[in-house]
Image: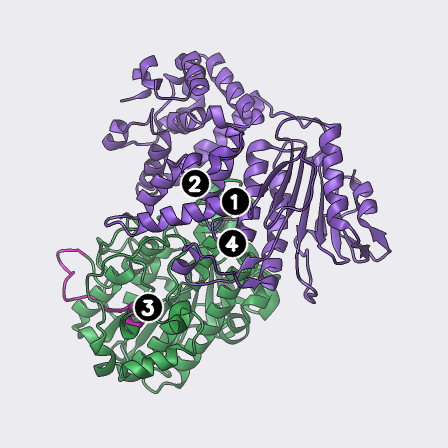
Chain colours: A purple, B green
Amino acid sequence: MLPHDLKPEQFKSYPPEAKKLALNYLGALQPLPLSFLPSLLKEIIEFDFKFPVERRAIESELGNLRSLSAVQISDWFREFAAIQMSASLERADWVNAPGLFVEQFSAHLWSTHQQDAFRLAAVHYADRLRAAVPPEAPATPRLGISIIGKGLDSYDQPLFRKLRPHGAYCTRVNPENGVKLLLDAVASRAKAHPAPYAHWYIDGGEEAEHDPVLTTVSYDALAPARAALLRKMQSDISRPGMGPETLRTHMAEMLPSEVGLDKLGDAVLSRFQLKLLTEGSGTQIFSTTFAQWAARETLRRAQPLTLLVRFAPRQRQKPMNELLSPSDKGSDLDLIGSLVDADMDAYYNWINQQRLPGAERSSFLVWFENHSSAVVIGPSVPRGTESSGSTDISQLLSWIS
Amino acid sequence: MRNSLSGSALISQSRRDFLRDAGGLVLGSTLLSSRLARAATTSSKKKVIVITFGGGARDQETFAPEGQENIPHLMRELIPHASFFTQVVNHGILGHYVATASLATGTYETFNNFATVPPENPTVFEYFRKQLRRPSSDAWVVAPSNGFNRIGESSNRSYGPGLGARVILPKHLLSAAISGGSADYQHLLRDNYETPFYSPELAGQEFELQQLETILKLSGDDFKNHARTLSSPDELSVYIVRQLMRQVAPSLLWVTLHDIDVAHAGAYSLYIDGIRRTDRLCGELWKMIQTEPEYAGKTSLFILPDFGRDSDEDAGGNGFQHHRTGDALSRTTWLMALGPGIREGVVYDRAVDSTDLVPTLGSMLGFSASLSQGKPIGELI
């Protein structure tokens, strides 16, 4: 089946909001090439579980598509239309299982050496869409905070080497009450600029005491869900004929209720947390990986105004089968490795924040927990500088607020 | 496509500058062509060892100024003796088994990376053995266990069964030797982090446990005792390589290292540890070549990654963790060649294709890789 054959009844299994959206824009979907449409349907079918900013972005994109004339559609999608499809892809149920289709299509692109052409088409489309429908500017300049090195008494190697060129490196920061001061500052911003899913606290370990106004995700709070997921993975792995692609498909089809994540009372956040564990590589086993991926997905999807990420020690590396086996035994922690991980992860947090609209006004702070070194980055902070003057967390925040 | 290619050229330029700054190396394009320095070793006595550098590592963790601390052996011990190609572009599928198979066939293979299938095109081992009438003992592969057991010979009708390399999967060998498992060895049996769920059923010419003793002259107990002193799967592989060089001395030996691919788990420190270990193991292999009588003075060593990893700048990826975007950094790698007749301390920045390796080996060893898509690298033959 091809997109121009789309009919309203084919969306009957979509969740209510997604179905309404698809039917409303059916005429805009039909002219699109098969090399493009399932990727859009993959977003639409999840519409009921999207964050507000994502919903608005999808609606804007659909609105733009509807506004294009036939000639413009042909022009916008010329590169996508040139992608050679296979008969098996055309026969696939790309309406009801767009995610599975996209995986199969990706394999097709690689094996037919069309990956570069598709990549270029996607970049060109994104550029045109951005020009036609500019992304939302943030209500207030964004602030990102990363806290790294929890539990480590000392470390004599240089830190923040990737971030220092972009801001001021401070070497005499009074660490007293640092975590509390930062969480309080984040909560203050949440109260000053209230909006759903706009202010986040992600912890790679146990959550510190914080204001409930924050949207919170933590590795420890997800321990029961992680254990349930690992049990399911182990069970799937032991089945004859199970390969990585089948397992990935099974995981993508999982529901929050299957790992006990349906009791949060927030379907959007439940689904988001499930995806962190089922779509992220390594998030099930390493807390540093979890915190970085959670931050990346939060920034990409929810586009928060404030994001505080506190990294915690991860378990030591062990054989994969052992890591994937849920265990009641206490884990041996790799404190130094975790600091090195988090140092790089903080850099990624900053990069991912800077990909969002309003980057030129955004600020960032990274701090070695309970130690005296930090880097602050912001529009008014001179780049590549170093400060050895005495300061504290509150003062650092004031420089970038 | 234009963006991707210009990206590759930029990467090449940077890498060349890093090397020139670091080592005072000479640009290959400034040298006059001369074959006077070629060693007099005849094709029949030449040996070749190929090392694939561990599953993808990026410039900023290796050859860029901030990464050079992770590769002291490559920088100080190998590069000064090597011809270094800064721009080796992989146009194929960026999955480790299919990409390594493509390196070994000189043709971009298109099979499912996770399938237990042989390459469709003849491998370098088949060209070598068939055309030079070499016995099976003269071509070997030492590889990680994730599906690489079929890499020794293709399904091509004119080549295929009986003409390929013998394949050793050290992890499977150790699993068999400890039969039932022991906590002492679990760190050596780590699976692929990209596909931790996948343990293919073995088929093809896998090295059998009983041959440990007859061919490698290792008792099961010796093997286990030594394995206990090692810290990673790649160290186990290099241990097997050493035994193979001493006891069998094959002319064509292919070693696939894989520890770096732990990056898929997202822990940067483990990725860096993998690079440092791989660097050290490459240094050890180079020393082995120089000290083993069967190899000294007549062996060419090729070291190259199968591909790179995603850049930090590509929003479609997640930095070092994966190689999924197909961006220039994930496609552009390097190649280092050392040995008799190969110019030392020279950097070439022209584009070379991943598939050029096999025809180059053919020109050096005296066979024709007739079905390969690549071309011999003129600077090495």
User: Which residues, given as a range, are shown in magenta?
Assistant: B155-175
x then y, percent, for residue A185:
76, 39
Work out how far the residue at label 2 is from the one at label 4, CA to CA, in angstroms.
18 Å
The residue identified by callout 4 is: A286
Dot 4: within a 10 Å radius of its alpha carbon, few (fewer than 14), some, or many (20 or more) residues?
many
The kind of residue tagged 2 is: Val
Work out how far the residue at label 4 is from the one at label 1, CA to CA, in angstroms.
13 Å
Dot 3: within a 10 Å radius of its alpha carbon, few (fewer than 14), some, or many (20 or more) residues?
many
Looking at marks 4 and 1 on the same chain, the residue that comes earlier in the sequence is marked by 1
Dot 2: within a 10 Å radius of its alpha carbon, few (fewer than 14), some, or many (20 or more) residues?
some
Work out how far the residue at label 2 is from the one at label 1, CA to CA, in angstroms.
10 Å
The residue identified by callout 3 is: B171
Above or below: residue A26 compared with residue A354: above
x then y, percent, for residue B216:
27, 81
Looking at the rendered structure, the secondary structure element under dot 2 is helix
x then y, percent, for residue A244:
33, 48
